[in-house]
Amino acid sequence: MRYPMHQPNVHEVRDNLAEYLAAAERGEEVLICRRNQPVARLVALQIAPRREARPLGLAADAGTPLPDSFFEPLPEELVRALAGQTAAADAEPGL
């Protein structure tokens, strides 16, 4: 069902924005005018319905079980490398 279109001027929309947003949410179309000349159209967005939250991570999405080793601490050498501490940076300068 198509509702009658509102045709307010800019100053009226500015003063009553919440009212015109509510009209758009109800499915009405608001044609915004400047000096009685149409310049913009305010309509409600067609938002897709929300889906269920999905589990995080690709393994969870694929149903792949994670091995126990996944939860073990990383090797200290790798932890230092990820922190930007390389073996060359740890060595004494001039050697």
Image: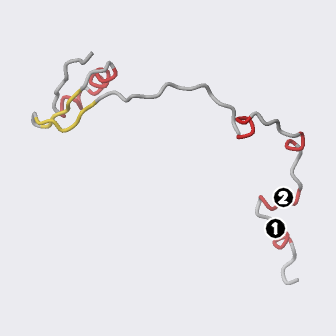
Please indicate whether residue 71 sits to the left or right of residue 53 in the image.
right
As helix, strand or loop, the secondary structure at mark 1 comes to loop
Query: Which is more toward the observer, 49 or 24?
Result: 49
Left or right position of 29 against 56: left
Q: Residue at x 20, y 32 (%)?
A: 32
In the rendered structure, the answer to whether residue 35 lies left or right of residue 2 reads left
Give yes or no for contact between labels 1 and 2 (Cβ–Cβ under 8 Å).
no
> Is 26 above or below relative to 32?
above
Task: Name which residue lies at 85% across and 84% down.
Answer: 94
Residue 31 lies, in percent from the top left, at 20, 30
The label nearer to you, 1 versus 2, is 2
Place of residue 36 in the rendered image (x, y in percent of width and height, measured from the top left): 10, 33
Quadrant of the image containing the C terminus:
bottom right
Q: Residue at x 76, y 63 (%)?
A: 84
The three-letter amino acid code for the residue at tag 1 is Thr
Using the rendered view, name the quadrant where residue 82 is placed.
bottom right
User: Where's the N terminus, which quadrant?
Assistant: top left
Residue type, mark 2 in image:
Leu
Q: Where is residue 43? Give x, y as percent.
A: 30, 29
Q: Which residue in the protein does label 2 denote?
A: 78
Q: Is residue 78 above or below residue 51?
A: below
Q: CA distance from mark 1 to mark 2?
A: 9 Å
Instruction: Give the percent coordinates (x, y) of residue 86.
Output: 81, 67
Q: Quadrant of residue 89?
A: bottom right
Q: Residues within 10 Å of mark 2 (few under 14, many from 20)?
A: few
Q: Nearer the viewer, residue 47 or 85?
A: 47
Sequence-wise, which precedes: disc 1 or disc 2? 2
Report the side of 24 relative to 93 (left or right): left
Q: Which residue position is annotated with label 1?
A: 86
